[in-house]
Image: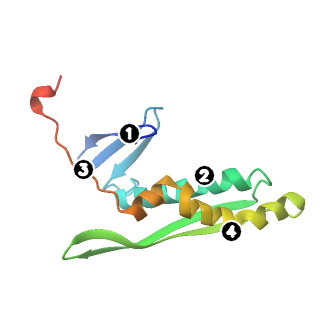
Amino acid sequence: MSDSLRHVRLTRVGAGGFQITNDAGGTIDVGLADSDFTPVELLLAALAGCAAINVEEITGRRATPDRFEVTASGDKVRDESGGRMENLQLLFDVVFPEGEGGDAARAILPRVVQQTHDRICTVSRTVASGSEVDYVLTDPDDRA
């Protein structure tokens, strides 16, 4: 029951370094270098980005924010079951200008954040639902 398949391609660019590319040609580096994002940071970025895009789209119809920041955080833990993130949190720091539009945006902000959490943000809803991830190897005979 897929609305639309999404994918990105990750390519090794050096020892411990990879580049992720989407269909539009956008890229992001992930790896071990100090300037690269780690996979955990990308997870946090995906959570913050999904929520921010949705919240800004709806509140932005009323007023352009003077400040809009989302900080994603969580604890990386390892135990007998392996590594994972716990205590994931998105902290919204949003300021709207004075006036009718800003008042309207402030008034709906809590509801929009809650709706984003409950039903709109695909990323956080996927994490919360505990969706399985299949790891599949290509068949060497199928390579071109």
Look at the image and tell me whether residue 13 can be seen: yes
Query: What's under tag 1, amino acid-wise?
Result: His
Query: What's under tag 2, amino acid-wise?
Result: Ile
Q: Nearer the viewer, mark 1 or mark 3?
A: 3
Q: Which residue sits furthest front?
A: 1
What residue is disc 1 on? 7
- Distance between the Cα atoms at labels 1 and 3? 14 Å
Q: Residue 89 at x, y = what percent?
A: 50, 71
Residue 82 drawn above or below residue 57: below
- Is the Cβ of the residue at disc 2 closer than 8 Å to that at disc 1? no
The label shown at residue 53 is: 2
- Distance between the Cα atoms at labels 2 and 3? 28 Å
Q: Residue at x 37, y 40 (%)?
A: 8
What residue is disc 3 on? 134
Q: Nearer the viewer, mark 2 or mark 4?
A: 4
Left or right, 107 with reference to 124: right
Q: Earlier in the sequence, mark 2 or mark 3?
A: 2
What residue is disc 4 on? 110
- Distance between the Cα atoms at labels 2 and 4? 15 Å
Q: Which residue sits furthest right?
A: 99
- Is the Cβ of the residue at disc 3 closer than 8 Å to that at disc 4? no
Q: Nearer the viewer, mark 4 or mark 1?
A: 4
Q: Residues within 10 Å of mark 1 (few under 14, many from 20)?
A: few
Q: Earlier in the sequence, mark 3 or mark 4?
A: 4
